[in-house]
Image (cartoon, rainbow, N blue to C red):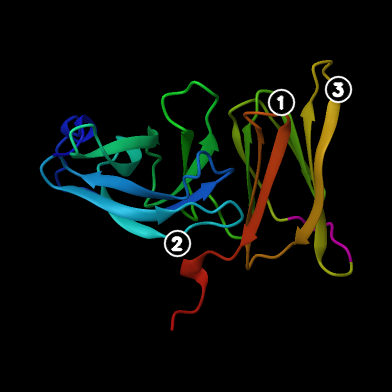
Amino acid sequence: MLAGCLLAMPAVSAAEMVSVRALCLQHVDGLKDVKLLSGSAKNPILTPVKLFTTTYSDQVSVPMDGGKKMTFVVEEKNEDGEDVLKIVAEGPLSRGNRQLALFIPAPEGSKTPYRLKVIDESEAKFPMGSTLIFNLSTSSARFMIGEHRKELKPGELGLIPLATQTNDFNQCTVRVFVTSRDGEWMPVSSTAWMATREMRSLALTYVHPRSKKPMVQCIQETPPWKLPQL
């Protein structure tokens, strides 16, 4: 017998296939392997997904009913020894046929160990050469990439085009700031990465759930579907 989270699932009819990847900002309770729940109450589909903190998971293709939630679970036994599913992260689906699931450590006392933010990572919304920026902190954030500068309010998502202000190695500077309690801009991260249309980048800031300090995660990659296929 499966848990009630399956019984509450809507029936999926003519669901489209969606490519999903995951990125975990920090592991909580040792949870590094989860399963993406899809399908229907009568025919649930559990797709394994590994949670990495320094790179994206492998992409998986699953049937999803547009406009509904994305749910990740782990399998457990209840007191009666029955197989049940425990929800560890859940959030609204984004639009698009390629979606990135961000696992964010939830505050202590939350119902689930992770908060889930799902981003449309199709190339129409996240073009090659660009940087997708996301402010998951509780303060305003400023992202400076090469000659570009963009400020985001808490919870805002933005896009920065390819930088042209580079050094002799075709690298651009990447700096992230957040506002302090006094309203002053406080530097959180400074690095450099290649400025090329062969790659695209993700830069986000969030608040560490225990230390309460602002953190930054930056990843640059060539998506797997853009690489030569053997």
x and y percent of residue 194 in the render?
A: 75, 63
Residue located beneath label 2 in the image: 58
Q: Residue, x 65% and y 59% (percent of image)?
A: 220
**Is tag 1's residue or tag 3's residue first in the polypeptide sequence?**
1
Question: Along the horizontal axis of the image, is 121 left or right of 184?
Answer: left
Task: Give the vertical position of 67 relative to 48 (above or below).
Answer: above
Could you tell me if residue 135 is visible in this image? yes
Q: Residue, x 80% and y 16% (percent of image)?
A: 181
Give the magenta range.
Answer: 163-167
Quadrant the N terminus occupies: top left
- Mark 1 burial class by Cα count in 10 Å: few <14, some 14-19, many 20+: many
Instruction: Work out which residue is located at the far top of the displayed protein and give it.
Output: 182
Q: How far apart are the alpha carbons under marks 1 and 3?
A: 10 Å
Count the marks: how many? 3
- Mark 3 burial class by Cα count in 10 Å: few <14, some 14-19, many 20+: few
Secondary structure of the residue carrying tag 2 is loop
Residue located beneath label 3 in the image: 184
Residue located beneath label 1 in the image: 140
Q: Residue, x 84% and y 27% (percent of image)?
A: 185
Q: Residue, x 62% and y 29% (percent of image)?
A: 209
x and y percent of residue 59 in the render?
A: 42, 60
Q: How far apart are the alpha carbons under marks 2 and 1?
A: 32 Å
x and y percent of residue 46 in the render?
A: 26, 51
Question: Along the horizontal axis of the image, is 97 left or right of 79?
Answer: right
Q: How far apart are the alpha carbons under marks 2 and 3?
A: 39 Å
- For badge 3, the amino acid type reads Glu
Does residue 166 show up magenta in the picture? yes
- For badge 1, the amino acid type reads Ser
- For badge 2, the amino acid type reads Asp
